[in-house]
Image (tube, helix red, strand yellow):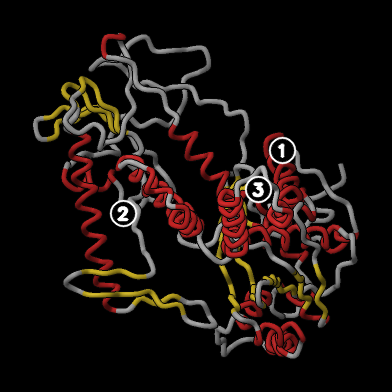
Amino acid sequence: LRRLAREHVPEIPKAELEQLLWFVDLVHELRQNRRWITPDRLLARWVDASGYLITLDDQARTNVERFFQLLHDITGGRPFALRRLIEELDFVREAGAVAEPPPAEAGDQVQLMTVHAAKGLEFPVVFIAGLNREIRDERPVVRFDPHLGWGARWRLRPSGECLEDPFYEAIQQKATQEVLEEEARLLYVAITRAKERLLLSWGQTRKQGSRTWKQLLLSCWPVNSELPGYQMVENIRVHVSLVNDLVPEGESVDHVGPEAPNVFFPKASPEAQYDFSLAVTALAEFVLCPRRYYLEHYLGLEPPPNRASPATRRGGTRARDLGTIVHELLSGKPIPEAPEEARTLVERFHASPLATRIDAADEAHHEEDFAFELCDVVLEGKIDVWFREGDRLVVLDYKTDQKLPQEGSPRWQAYEVQLQTYALALEQLTGRPASEAYAVFLRHGEYRKVELGDWLADRVSEQLERWKNAQQNCHFPLRESEECWACPYRGNLCRRD
């Protein structure tokens, strides 16, 4: 278009050409700012500049405003990677593409709806499932109450610890109470939709939350949920079923009535069976050796006592404990009882060029928690430190290895996957790709650069698929390498196939 403007093409009117050039400049401006400005603000800038809203009626303007709000909710009010944003919008669109329920005259049917949508309606039989779902307690950074004023959560540097001021605590307590009251009203609406029979269900989980619909129900309705069979509660006949087993395959129950036995439905067999979340450090250990990952993370075993490291047998600090102490010291947390070995490693890093870059950076963050989805798995973890130099982002991960891993070795490959996953996480957090990533080997005073590129998501996805397939097939093969000689399970729980 700029070339056409210079050549003065007669077929294009000058006014239209100027509009096209203005559009090119606007697109260039938005592209330059996409790493710093949130998507909803970028789109609002284009809408305002183009006068698009003037051409719309009131309903269309409302839809545009709702779309702005959707963008803000998805991105959390911060810059966001375009590819990730498109995936989120596709997910929202697919989730909303639900067929209308069949008409009432269609015969026996099951209608799924939210409690809000069921207001004013009644049904012969009502099912309310998942009463053990935890009631969310939102804790934003800043809260406001017209009577109490402003309150905030303060993040201390450099430790990263979050503290709530007294105003925030008072506002949060009031907001929590309002949420519980609203949830109680919703539960009442859901229960009163039933005309003849009401069926309530919840699961028994290891962590029983105190803020659930189950707790709200049992706090005002004295049902003994642990006693199977019929009970009379406030002149209401209640039947409690405890499901601890499944009906044998091929058997079924023909009818359900007041005197019918408990009904058990066979468990569904999903196409894929794997954990829905995974710590990045655990993924790195899987890359190092699937067999060791299976023993420690899948079975939850610990190394045999007689295979402890020499330092531990001499009364020294365990490697993992030492690593934790070193990480906390490097994040700025004071540990008066820290061992001398840990202090030495920290001082050695503070004298390194990377520490100088962190001190001079535009911003630096320690112990940054994250969680994001990739390949239907939620990856979670904590970045030791990342910092920004202008428009460049740098990721560091501290290592306290006794022995420096060789390039191309299984351990170095595991560290590569770990740092590359951290780089992906940082892109999710900031909306900008990381420029550099380093594994910092504190004992050796060396830091090694990890390769980054547009292929990061594919590399990490490949390892995730291997991990998912291993769980699906329950096959965790031994990866033989020089690491086997130092493995605490060698010759004991781990033997060659």
Distance (Cα) linking label 2 and label 3: 29 Å
* Image-based side of 144 in relation to 393, left or right: left
Distance (Cα) linking label 1 and label 2: 36 Å
Identify the residue position indicated by label 1 in the image. Answer: 469
Identify the residue position indicated by label 3 in the image. Answer: 298
Looking at the image, is mark 3 or mark 1 nearer the viewer? 1
* Image-based side of 54 in relation to 356, left or right: left
Q: Earlier in the sequence, mark 2 or mark 3?
A: 2
Residue in front for this viewpoint, 216 or 89 = 89
Q: Earlier in the sequence, mark 3 or mark 1?
A: 3
The amino acid beneath tag 1 is: Asn
The quarter of the displayed image where residue 144 is located: bottom left
Label 1: few (<14), some (14–19) or many (≥20) C-alpha neighbours in 10 Å: some
Residue in front for this viewpoint, 436 or 188 = 436
Q: Quadrant of the C terminus?
A: top right
* Image-based side of 477 in relation to 114, left or right: right
Residue in front for this viewpoint, 303 or 441 = 441
In what element is the residue under mark 2?
A: loop
Instruction: Tell me where residue 8 appears, x and y as whole percent.
Output: 70, 52
Residue in front for this viewpoint, 441 or 71 = 71
Cβ atoms at labels 2 and 3 below 8 Å apart: no
Q: Which of the numbered marks, if any, corresponds to residue 210?
A: 2
The amino acid beneath tag 3 is: Tyr
Look at 37% across and 20% down and name the residue there: 263
Q: Earlier in the sequence, mark 1 or mark 2?
A: 2
Instruction: Tell me where residue 260 appears, x and y as whole percent.
Output: 29, 16
The amino acid beneath tag 2 is: Ser
Residue 443, compared with residue 234, is above or below; it is below
Instruction: Tell me where residue 249 appears, x and y as whole percent.
Output: 53, 16
The quarter of the displayed image where residue 164 is located: bottom left
Distance (Cα) linking label 3 and label 1: 14 Å
Label 3: few (<14), some (14–19) or many (≥20) C-alpha neighbours in 10 Å: few
